[in-house]
Amino acid sequence: MARTQALVQLSEDLIGRLDARAAAAHRSRSDLIREAIERYLTADPAAAVDAAIVESYTSTPPDDDFGASWAARQSIEAEPWDEPS
C-alpha cells in the first residue's frame, strides 16, 4: 500500500505519552498513530449505543407481564363502578 507523509503538530506531553506507549508495545510511533487513526475512523458511535442497549436488555430482560398488568390496572381504575344500594 502506498503511503503519503502527513505532518502533524503534537504537544510535547502527547509525544511523550505516545513514545512511552510505543516503546512498551515494541512498536513505532507511526504504527501507533496509524492504528489510532484507523480505529477512530472506523468507530461507529451509533453502533456503540445500540450495543449498550442490547447489552442492557440481555442482562436484565424486561418483565413481559409489566404492560399487561399496567393496562389491567388502568382499565379497572377507569371503570365507573356502580356502588351497591
Image (tube, rainbow, N blue to C red):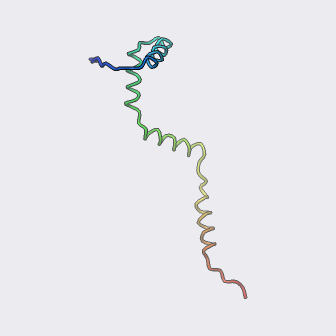
State left or right for residue 66 relative to residue 3.
Answer: right
Where residue 63 appears, x then y in whole percent?
Answer: 61, 53
Give the image location of residue 64, x and y in percent.
Answer: 59, 55
In the image, is 37 to the left or to the right of 16?
left
Image height of 74 relative to 54, above or below: below
Q: Residue at 27%, 18% (x, y): give it.
A: 4
> Residue at 61% across / 67% down in the picture?
72
Q: In which quarter of the image is residue 19?
A: top left
Q: Where is residue 27 in the image (x, y as percent from the top left)?
A: 44, 12
Name of the residue lying farthest toward the bottom:
85
Q: Which of 6 and 75 is in front in this view?
A: 6
User: Where does the N terminus fall, quadrant-wise?
Assistant: top left
The C terminus is located in which quarter? bottom right
* Vertical relation: 37 (above or below) 21: below
Answer with the quarter of the image where residue 84 lies. bottom right
Count of marks, rendered view = 0
* Furthest residue toward front: 12
**How far from the left and from the top, in percent, is residue 8?**
34, 20
Q: What residue is at 37 percent from the left and 21 percent from the top?
A: 34
Above or below residue 18? Residue 61 is below
